[in-house]
Image (cartoon, helix red, strand yellow):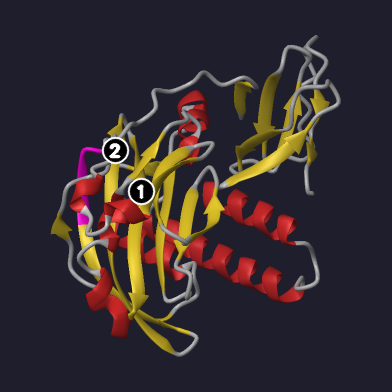
Amino acid sequence: MYILSVLFSATKPMYNNYNQSSFPHPGSLSIWRGNYFNYVVPNNWRVVEDGQFAVVLVSPDNAALTIMVGNSGLPVNYNPWQFVYEKLLAMQPYDLRIGQPRPAPPIAGCSVAYEFDCTYFSNGIPYQGLAKCSVAYSYNICTMVMTCAASHQSQWANYASWLPQVAFQVSATNGAAFGMQGIMAQNLDISQTEGQRYQEYREWSQRTWDEVRGQRNESIDRQNFQFRENLGNVTTWTNSYGYPTVELPNNYNYYWINRQGQIYGTNNSTENPNFGSTQDWVRMNRYLP
């Protein structure tokens, strides 16, 4: 069972100092400010994702890219190598290989980091890159952030000296980034083992891929909505009391809300919090665009 307030309190944002002098061509870089993150964008590169959990940039010729993706609420003993592997695997690469970890400077707001060499194939083209996992610890949970720069393997020598630095220049400016705000308000006790989490991720990955193949004619907005929910391990709910649509953890299959905006979660379809209560609980409805 689970109760929380609809309005979450803000958390302290993470900031970063951008040092463009460390790049070969500082004039070709610009700082973009999104709703959740500030990040560096090379000239003429496309921002293909800028959301609560991820930022993705792609070069004009589609031969190189940078990825930033993070999640809060992970167990403190979660393996950084595993986190990087899972996030890169979401791109559906072939023959993904990740090297041994090396200590590295973390991004702003994190305390430790490890970097990994990586190679994979996509559409028959070999890619090479460098990924970093930065970790911020808080009580019995942690936030992990993967930043990765990669390109066609034949071009990696041209990118290796500067593109990883671009990928790492990301700072969270919103307390809701990576789902941190919701995690702090919920104070959920995460007890799943690493093996269980990996199995759940593989099942999610397969379900997501099946949905993409089966819904090719549906709108891009709907696909992006589902992708963001899966990255954040949340579901979106509406209510009849006029409160805003809210994202809630997917730990529960059913949610109820009362007039004061308190939310009650359960996995029991027959459970009704109105029994023995005067709070006027009503069941919330799952939102899909």
Amino acid type, mark 1: Val
Point out residue 17 in the picture as x, y percentages from the top left corner.
Answer: 26, 35
Q: Which residues are magenta?
A: 110-114
Tag on residue 250?
A: none
Measured Cα–Cα span from mark 1 to mark 2: 9 Å
> In the image, is residue 81 part of the stretch drawn in magenta?
no
Please say if the residues under marks 1 and 2 sit with CB atoms less than 8 Å apart. Answer: yes
Q: Which residue is mark 2?
A: 136
The residue carrying mark 1 is 145
Q: Give the prevailing secondary structure in the magenta stretch.
A: strand
Across and down, in percent, residue 225 comes to 67, 52
Q: Is residue 79 visible?
A: no
Residue 269 in percent (x, y) is at 77, 40
Q: Earlier in the sequence, mark 1 or mark 2?
A: 2
Q: Nearer the viewer, residue 16 or 192?
A: 16
Residue lying at 49% horizontally and 37% vertically, measured from the top left: 36
